[in-house]
Amino acid sequence: MSIRSTLPVTTRPRTRAELRAVVTDRRFVRHYVEMVVAMVLGMVVLLPLWRLAGLPDVSGSVELHSLLMATSMTVGMSAWMLVRRHSWAAIGEMAAAMYLPFVVLFVPFWAGLLDGHGVMMAGHVLMLPAMLLAMLRRPAEYVGHHH
């Protein structure tokens, strides 16, 4: 069963069946994978470019390093979302999904409950469900036809 036949274009999934229809839709899964790839490419390409552009080394600051990494990933993913003609609202929500996990993890880091490595690892892991939640806010953005 297609997501198009079970949900109006702007409706979020409300039942398990609707949620299952969304997350198993090939177009939805393909968009998710594409955005993860764009995010990784943004990180791999842009982090070295920041240095070449003269940005000081921020690896000594967990907060700055995390935010710079999130920015690199956000730029890559946002660029891909623009190519795919996503709405500005969807791009903004996805950008928030890149930063929010790190920002939330700064609190236990500042409290001494998490070290810098833990912030980086957990931040990257938490981005994945944060991206999924952002996508589930606008399922039609990710199962509709984009170029």
Image (tube, rainbow, N blue to C red):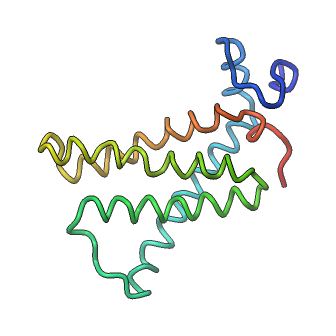
> Which residue is painted at 66% across and 20% down in the image?
19
Return the x and y of residue 134 as percentages of the image width and height.
Answer: 59, 38
Query: Quadrant of the image for the C terminus?
Result: bottom right
| Residue ranking furthest to the left | 112
Query: Is residue 34 left or right of 146 when viewed as pictured?
Result: left
Location of residue 98 in the rendering, given as x and y in whole percent from the top left corner? 48, 50
In the image, residue 98 sits, relative to residue 56, either above or below, namely above
Q: Residue at x 83, y 30 (%)?
A: 9
- Judge left or right: residue 75 versus residue 139: left
The reply, left or right, for residue 112 in relation to residue 101 is: left
* Image quarter of residue 93: top right
Name the residue: 64% across, 12% down: 16
Q: Position of residue 68 (x, y in %)?
A: 39, 65
Question: How many marks do you count on the picture?
Answer: 0
The x and y percentages for residue 137 are: 65, 33
Q: Nearer the viewer, residue 136 or 89?
A: 89
Identify which residue is drawn at 55% across, 41% down. 131
- Seen in the picture, residue 44 relative to 15 is either above or below; the reply is below
Q: Nearer the viewer, residue 52 or 91?
A: 91
**Rendered-image quadrant of the N terminus:** top right
Q: Quick check: 9 left or right of 106?
A: right
Q: Nearer the viewer, residue 92 or 42?
A: 92
